[in-house]
Image (cartoon, rainbow, N blue to C red):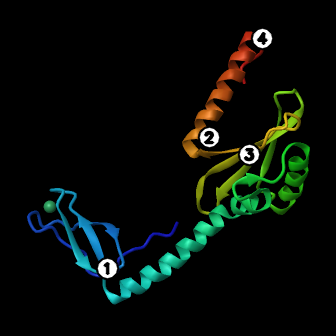
Amino acid sequence: MNKFKPTGVRLRCGPCKRAMSFCSYSRVDLQYHCNGCGGTASRETTDDEKRLWDIWQSIQSKEIDELHHPWHQFIKTFRSNNEWKYSGWEAMQKMERFMKRFPQVVEVGVDDDYFASSSLYFIPHSTKTDYMGTSVVYIPQCTGEDPIAFFLYEGHAKNLADVLKTLLRAHRTARGEARR
Ligand SMILES: [Zn+2]
């Protein structure tokens, strides 16, 4: 995400005379931090910085909209007042159509608790430059249950991938297959 950069004067630490690092911002003032003594200081934002801030804010909110766009559309299509509108086979059919609109959604086949073919759908929250995580929707085909959604941050996704890789590797080793 584009970062706001102050254009006005950079503060120096009183006690150690070091140039301080810019650490946080509001529309009213800028906070600086000294890497030497840990001291803090602030100054008012300049008019130029206020203008930049407003531009940056509008870019940021556009980027956030873009980041969550497929997920928001998913919610709009599949839920109403927090209730799921479809389940089972019907939801899977709707999902097939949804994936045509959002080709970034990835489907992985699983079995539900009745051993019927079902799916996990991975809906990324990402733009060209950012990745926040992935929503996962599980739709069991024949159990009569509502779909379930959960969110994987990058760390969650990595842990899950590691567990699956480890299990598969152990299974292959147990069968005496060459490690891949
Ligand atoms: Zn200092």
Q: Quadrant holding ligand 1?
A: bottom left
Kind of residue sitting beneath label 2 = Ala
Q: Secondary structure at mark 3?
A: strand
Q: Tell me if the residue at label 2 has its CB under 8 Å from ligand 1.
A: no
Query: CA separation, marks 2 and 1?
Result: 39 Å
**What is the CA distance from the residue labelled 1 to the residue labelled 3?**
42 Å
Q: Whole-Å distance between the Cαs marked 4 and 1?
A: 65 Å
Q: Amino acid at mark 1?
A: Val
- Quickly name the residue at label 3: 137
The circle on residue 87 is none
Under circle 4, the secondary element is loop
| Nearer the camera: disc 4 or disc 3 | 3
Amino acid type shown at disc 4: Arg
Which of disc 2 and disc 4 is earlier in sequence?
2
Marks 4 and 2, how far apart in space? 27 Å
> Residue 54, position in %: x, y?
46, 82
Measured Cα–Cα span from mark 2 to mark 3: 14 Å
Label 3 beta carbon within 8 A of ligand 1: no
Q: State how many labels appear.
A: 4
Foreground mark, 2 or 3, reads: 3
- Residue underneath mark 2: 157
What's the residue type where badge 3 is placed? Val
Disc sitting over residue 28 in the figure: 1
Tell me the mark number nearer the camera, choosing from 2 and 1: 1
Considering the numbered disc 1 on the image, is that residue within a helix, a strand or a loop? loop
Look at the image and tell me in which quarter the C terminus lies: top right
Q: From the top left corner, tell me how far across and down residue 7 is, in percent.
A: 34, 80
